[in-house]
Image: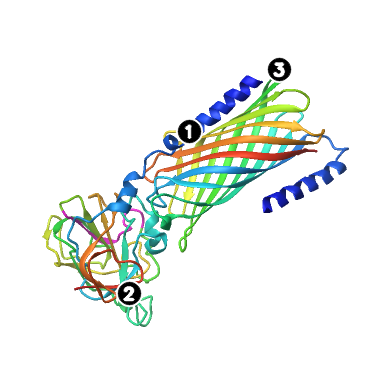
Amino acid sequence: MKRICVISFLFILMLFSCTKTLIGDEGKQDEDIYLNYQTKTDLELPFNEEWYVFVGGRTHQDGGHHFITRGTGQRYAYDLAIVIDGSSFSGDSSKNENHYCFGKRLNAPANGKIIAMENNIDDNYLSGTVNDNINDSNLAGNYILIDHFNGEYSLLAHLKKGSVLVNLGDIVTKGQEIGQAGNSGNSTGPHLHYHLQNSPNYLNGIGLPAQFRNYYEDDTLVDRGEPVKSQFIRKN
Amino acid sequence: MKQNQLLIVVICVLSFTNFNGQTLSKNNSFDFSIGYNVGALKNLEIAPVSRYDYNSAIYKFKYQRITKKEKIFEVQLDYLQSEVENNVSSLLNFEYTKIGISVASLKKIYNKNRLLIHVGLESYSDLSLYDINPNNQFVFDQTLGLSSRFSYQINQKQHLFSKLTLPTLLLRITNSNANVYSLNRFQSILWKIGYSYSFSEQLSGQLSYDFNYDRLQISNAFRELQYQVNLGINYKF
């Protein structure tokens, strides 16, 4: 009886001492990225007008749903649109054309090579509703994936059908027009989804913080920074 | 303070029912316990944090029925709520609630020299809620596994017991997906050991220790570890 109690007690102590091993080290790389990552690419905002940050930032509140999408590169993703007088549209919100950002010019945020793209997915017919043919294979809708040759890759998603101006293998330069904002894929309204990831694979990899250079956030000039939710941002 | 009041109320209720239940057979029992949980959590789908820690009270309520053939049927409800904390950033802390229901059916396979052994199947349904405004997240886990229960009678009033469960199959549903995992991806162990002292034919007290561990080897790695010390009462009727 005593022996059983002693053995059980020792076993319990042994289990307690193994906590660190049992929880493991997975996620240390994610922690390091969260705390220390400095974007290598010289990024500029990929549009010419003033846009509004609907999703962006490093908290669950600011980063929104992107905090639950590790493995798809979206942890630090931005959802951006144009907002005027407190609204992103005028008139009937279900029509894509009534949204201020729909069809707006999008630029390459930095130099690089086009390594993946899609240009033929219909924009969602009704803003607010995703088309029936959208599934796990085409969540980004029409998109452009750019290799920046330094282990960083930019993804611009939900572009307007037929608006993409570049082809696979093209070399693009920072500021070059590459397409137009749209509402294709898993998108509930016209907007630009932008994220930086560490992998050349479509929606696969670890998301990286994207620090842009030389832009205004809420009329304050920023030399290098990460826009966050509720800010108005534009290029200098 | 609230916990103490709750415990007193439960003891009073059970004392009353004890008085009124003298004529019934004693194949059924209720357990109620309050414990202290020390937990560690990793869920990379939720946040870039390799380890969260949380400490909290845990409440357990169990109904057990022993059939004429000495089969055991058990249903247990667990509840805990705690803030989980990490060393990376306090911005990534959140309120965590876990509600679990387990159902077990165990058959007697050994009864000799005061040692009683049952084996069977056990199912666990756990709902984990992550209070992350404005996008609250949930994880629902349904597991099925093999379970064994050991009971050793020290004397007429005291016995030791232990239960080991090895879940082998997991159905996991989250806000973003649903998947089934077997032993190559999912490893889990639940172990309980305890001591029971009978105050009367119907009422006994229990002190137990629980060790629960879940590991899911996927891109969004998940691991959870719990150590629990529980103090409870058992009422037979």
Chain of the residue on which disc 2 is drawn? A
The amino acid at mark 1 is Ser
Q: What residue type is labelled 2?
A: Asn
Instruction: Specify whether residue A165 is painted magenta.
Output: no
Q: Name the residue under label 2.
A: A96
Residue that badge 1 annotates: A17
Circle 1 crowding by C-alpha within 10 Å: few under 14, some 14–19, many from 20: few
Circle 2 residues within 10 Å: few <14, some 14–19, many ≥20: many
The residue located at (45%, 55%) in the rendering is B93
For residue A65, side relative to residue B155 (left or right) = left
- Residue at 54% from the left image edge and 27% from the top image edge: A11
**Residue at 65% of width from left, 34% of height from top?**
B105
Q: Is mark 1 on a helix, strand or loop?
A: helix
* Part of the protein shown in magenta: A135-148
Residue A58: where, in percent of width, then height? 35, 59
Quadrant holding the C terminus of chain B: top right
The image shows residue A102 at horizontal and vertical percentages of 28, 73
Label of residue B49 in the image:
none
Closer-to-camera residue (B41/A203): B41
Q: Where is residue B212 in the image (x, y as percent from the top left)?
A: 54, 37
Q: In this view, does B99 lie above or below A233?
A: above
Q: Distance between the residues labelled 2 and 3?
A: 76 Å
Look at 48% across and 49% down and name the residue there.
Answer: B173
Q: Which mark is residue B112?
A: 3
The vertical placement of A50 against B107, above or below, is below
Q: Find the distance from the CA under tag 2 to the CA under tag 1.
A: 58 Å
Give the secondary structure at mark 3: strand
Q: Which colour scheme is used?
A: rainbow
Q: Which chain carries label 1?
A: A
- Badge 1 vs badge 3, beta-carbon distance below 8 Å: no
**Depth order, front residue of A59/B62:** A59
**Mark closer to the chain start, 2 or 1:** 1
